[in-house]
Structures are given as structure tokens and as C-alpha cells.
Amino acid sequence: MFRKLHEPGADAVTIYIDGEAVAAEAGESLAAALLRQPEAWTRTTPVSGSPRAPYCLMGVCFECLAEVDGIASVQTCLTPVKAGMRVARQQGRRVLTA
Amino acid sequence: MRPDIVVVGAGTVGAAIAYGLAVRGERVLLLDGGDGDFRAARANFGLVWLQGKGLGMPAYQTLTRRSIGSWQGFADGLEARSDTGLCYEQNGGLAFCLGADGFEKRQGALQRLHNQWDGGEPDWEMVDRSGLERLLPKVTLGPDVTGASFGHRDGHANPLRLLAALHAAVIRLGGLIRSNASVREIVGSGTDFRLAVGDEVIVAPRIVIAAGLGTSALARQVGLDVPLRPERGQILVTERLDPFLPLPGSGLRQTADGTVMIGATNEDVGYDLSTTGDAAARLSRKAVLIVPALAGAGLVRQWAGLRVLTPDSYPIYAQSESHPGAFVAVCHSGVTLAAFHADGLAAAIAAGSLPDALSPFHQSRFDVPQAA
């Protein structure tokens, strides 16, 4: 649905979304990279289980939460992409792990 | 409608009394204050709690027991009359102990309370760390946790749903609720009271003042001196998590929605509702000492409320001698005592006078004895 308007050139990096290698640009918003995926949702809500995707893209709506490098419920729209980043879509209520 | 009785204050205390009066067929007018008023009812932690309460005041222990004993029935009736679930659970509650000292201190405090109460077998026990692990199989406890006191009759409910349910039930029972209706002045006039609200005067033969921290100024006008002070409590709440904490603890409980509430501070800062980073840090640190995995949970909100405290922290229930028909009810355990307020207290007010059993809660206990 969404596509990048320019080639990242020297800033091209690879990140991993649910284990899958994905092309992205260093420094772009992680939410933008997620929105370019065929499955654009980033989490399912803990309330109804419905899928949610990045929405406000400015840190307000908290719809774009995902696990980033082991830290859960990160606002991906406020997180710049870095090479090798590991992102996991969140499913419903998180389980606390010791 | 000309009301039989006006309840001033639509927080958890006033609304519970109004509900109890409406159940008894009284035509009730419930007056809620302004949006900017201090609203303890909307900052509550939500415990329905017995353990640890009432040292130095056996009557308070008895009153709390009575309310806890009737809470399930109260909840059932209120849920049916409001179509609002209260998320009430009474499976027991925990007060976590850190270090060997913490465990002994807690045990000592509960033992003193038990000695004060001659009601038979204790309904609490101290559980050691392994006992606590059995009660909380999904929790990995922090290394400093030595155990907990386990109150068999403790529980929790959703305090915001409780408030909403009380309001809904009052209306369904034919009562009236007015919002943004702060009472400026109360004047006794013959057998009636005249309450100035905005440009309007509301007339009723009986009134109940349950206006939280606003009570003192109103009660004075019907001849009752009600000393109160605010105590700030701050609470944190996490994102929704998969259920892991099957029992509420004092200061740590997982709600039916999955969020974890972490509380609460006790601060003497006057009428200041600010939240502070220092409190957030202290509360988080304490929670992580008990359940280290909470360090990975996201906090979504922090808020503050002002507890309504009397000089000895226990409730004040009183009726005016100079102005018969005027009653006062203030306390800071409005959720735990809601069942009593809706039942025993509302019944007494409907009947026109408070029973002797409530005399320990009269504010005259704070009067300074006259010097000879």
C-alpha cells in the first residue's frame, strides 16, 4: 500500500520484523517501515484482539506499539530505524516474563 | 420534585448513602460539586479491605467487618439495579513483607489488632515465602520478599464502576442527581433546610453532608465542627498485562482489565494534586522489589488524589443537635464502607437518627475537654 518515494542509497539497512528480513532506511520512523509491509498491523489490542496499525505518527495515539529489541510496547512512530533492529508484533495482553 | 432528603456530595460516600436511601423509598436529590473539586472517589485504589485496620478503635474494626460481610450482597443488588459490573472479588488479599524485619513487624501489628478484637479465630494468617509462591504461581518474587500477611476476607473492586453504578442506580430508583451543583450555603428554616446552589434555593426537610474535604465548611453551618485534612496519595497504573496476580495486595493489584495498579503515597502537602517524579520512582522501585518482572511493564498513567482524613483517620458519622435532620458522613475508606453506607447508615438516616453503635464515630471525640 505504501512505498518509499526515494531510494535510501547509503542509508539502506536491514531490520527484522517477526524474524523476517526487511529493507529500511536508517533514521526513518520505524512505524513507516512497518506500514510498508504487506501486513501493516503492528499489534492486536489487549481489549478486543483487533489488529492495530500506526495511526497518528506523532506519538499521541499509542496504536503503533510493538516490541523493539526485546522492549515491549515501544511507540514505533517515535523510534528511528537502526540497522539490525529486531521488531516483533504484539499480540493482545503482554505476558510478564521474569 | 420536592425531595425527602438531599445528599450533598456525589462521591462514593454520598452516592452510596443516596442509593441506600433510594432503595428505602426516599425521594433523593444527590448534589455533585464542580468539575474542579477534589474528587477522592475518582482517584481510588479499589481495595475492599479489612486486614490491618482499626488499631486503637475497636468500633472501626467492627464497622469494617460488618461492611465487608455484606459487600457481596451489596454488590449483587447494585449490579442488578445498575446493569454495571463492579469486578468485585473477595478471594483474600495480601500485604507483602520485605526482609525478616518487615515480616515480624507485620505479624506484630496484626497480632495487636487481633488482641484488641475478641471475636474469635483470626481471619488472617502470615504466609512465608514458599506459601506466598503457592498462592501466586505465576509470580517470580523478588529476593527480599519474605512473605505476606494474607487476609482471608479482603478483596477488591473497580472503584470507578462502583461510583458509576451507584449513580445509575440512584436515577433508576427515581432519585435525581445534579452535577456542577456546589452548595454555597445551608440555612435552617423551621423544619426545613434551604440550600443555596447557584441562583437557586433547594428546600428539603433532611440533608446529608458527605462532601469529602468540602464537608467542614458546610457542616459548620448546621452546628457541627468536622475537622478534616487532605492527604495526597499517588498511584501508578501499567499497561494491560496477561493475568498473573490472582490476589490483590495493599499497594499492588491487577485489575480485571489486566492493568496493574501500584500505590500509594501518603503525603502531607495540603491541597496539591500534583504528581511527582519522586513518587513515581519510589512506587516503581517498591513494586519491582516485590515482582521484578514489572520492570518490563509500561506505565500508562500516574495520578494523585486527596484522602479525606479526620484527626484519627477514622470516619465521622454525626447528626446535628442544633439542626435536627442534618447528618454528616465522611471517611477515607469509601469503597470498603460502601456496603455499610448503603445499608446500615442509610437505614438509620431514613429512620431519622443514628444508633448508639455509631456514637464512637461522632466528631465530639476530637473536642478538647474543658479545663476545670
Image (tube, coloured by chain):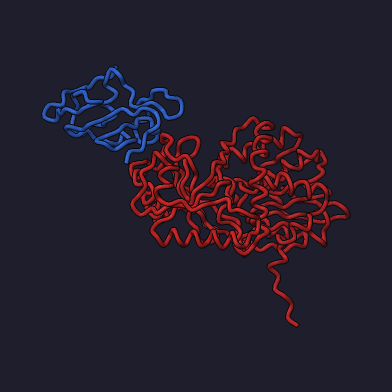
Chain colours: A blue, B red
Q: Is residue B234 visible?
A: no
Judge by depth and name the residue closer to the eye, A61 or B130: B130
Is residue B75 in view?
yes
**Front one among B290 and A11:** B290
Q: Residue furthest right?
A: B190
Horizontal and vertical percent position of residue B92: 54, 44
Q: Picture quarter containing residue A24?
A: top left
Residue at point 58%, 46% (across, down): B153
Q: Quadrant of residue B355?
A: bottom right
The quarter of the picture where the N terminus of chain A appears is top left
Q: Where residue B207 sits in the image (x, y, percent)? A: 78, 50
- Residue name at image x 72 percent, y 52 percent: B209
User: Which residue is found at the position 66% from the left and 35% from the top?
Assistant: B76
In this view, the residue farthest toward the front is B121
Above or below, B360 relative to A77:
below
Please indicate whether residue A57 sits to the left or right of residue B7 in the image: left
Spot occupied by residue A50 in the image (x, y as percentages of width and height): 42, 23
Quadrant where the C terminus of chain A is found in the figure? top left
Marks counted in the figure total: 0
Residue that sits furthest to the left in the current view = A10
In-front residue for pair B327/B110: B110
Question: Residue at (70%, 41%) from the top-left corner?
Answer: B178
Judge whether A81 appears above or below B42 on screen. Answer: above
